Image (spheres, grey):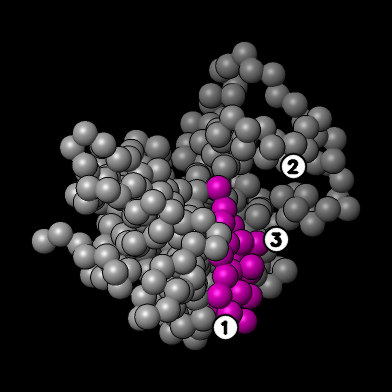
Amino acid sequence: MLRYKDLDKLASKFKGYIVTGHHQEDYLETLLVQLIRGAGLNSLKTLGPFENNRFRPLVLVPNPIRLALLQNSDWEIFEDESNDSEDYLRNRLRKKVLPILLEEGANPEKIYRNFHELESPRTSHRALNEQHKTGEEQIRRISRQVLESESSSICKYIIDTHLKSLGLHPISTNFLKDLIAKIDSRSAFSLENKESWFWKSVSSDLYILPKYGLFFKESEFDQVRGFLKWNGKTKRIPSGCTTATIQEGDKIFVGGIHREVTELLREREIPVPIRKMLPILKRGTKTVLVCLRMWDARAEDICSDDFRVPG
């Protein structure tokens, strides 16, 4: 029998979902288990239809319809032998507590719908729509003051809401713990999951950078017309210049001295995952311009002291 760890690997390999048979009465059982163990508000939203790489179609089906489908189908039902053992809390709740709740009028479907937003799944089609936006519209920034002061559950709600606006899935509980620990350390960090990069400097807000973002696509240079394209923007390149991306040790002559390009980008709080994608201009082997405005229209390009950009 495949374990969840094995299923996770398969789902990741084929970029698919793990489909489970959880239904609305399973939700009530799970909710009771978590409340007994001291879970908080988020326990009410457990067993969502779509969570990370899990898909639970039967939680969307009322129990009478689900049971009728099973009775009138040719599907073979496999019963886990551990379901009969009262050594497990879940089984004791199923046999002793759940029947009382149902007899008293508990409606699993209504309770489930009260605490779940049952809307259309955020599929790749929505992500494709995001790709028609400019790169700047595909970035989310969350106030560091909020993340440093609010509870973990509030932080997760805020982050998940921003991810939802990008057509992405909520973060997992374990990922949230790692993220909160990094934020509380008051240090710069980069974290990634399957869909996004999360970056923050010591003093900046938290950046959420979806991996489908235009800023993670390589730049394109039209040598005939002399135009550079990156991050949904176009820039005319002066004659005699070539385009490149930043390499370790690259320097540019600014303020009368040669400065490390990466150090200048760190000072300007450019997210680390973006730095290796950011286009630069070279004249020969010499770096003469760092195209910051192609990343953020409000920023000024970093221009070498001895390089004049044509008007």
Identify the residue at horizontal 60%, vertical 47% (top origin).
Answer: 25
**117 or 201: nearer the eye?**
201
* Foreground disc of the pair 1, 2: 1
**Does label 3 or label 1 sit earlier along the sequence?**
3
Q: Mark 1 points at which residue?
A: 186
Q: Name the residue under label 2.
A: 5
Magenta stretch: residue 80 in it?
A: no
- Tell me the amino acid under the disc marked 3: Val
Identify the residue at horizontal 51%, vertical 36% (top origin).
Answer: 57
Give the quadrant of the C terminus. bottom left
Magenta stretch, residue numbers: 168-194
Above or below, 207 against 67 in this view is: below
Which percent across, then down, holds residue 70? 59, 24
Above or below, 41 against 119 in this view is: below
Q: What secondary structure is found at the residue carrying circle 1?
A: loop
In the image: residue 257, left or right of residue 152 = left
In the image: residue 196, left or right of residue 227 = right
Q: What secondary structure is found at the residue carrying circle 3?
A: helix
Q: Which class describes the residues within 10 Å of circle 1: few (<14), some (14-19), or many (20+)? A: some
* CA–CA distance in space, label 3 to label 1: 35 Å
Q: Which class describes the residues within 10 Å of circle 3: few (<14), some (14-19), or many (20+)? A: some
- Tell me the amino acid under the disc marked 1: Arg
Which percent across, then down, holds residue 119? 36, 46
Q: Which class describes the residues within 10 Å of circle 2: few (<14), some (14-19), or many (20+)? A: few
Which percent across, then down, holds residue 15? 55, 34
Which percent across, then down, holds residue 288? 34, 62
Q: Name the residue under label 3.
A: 33
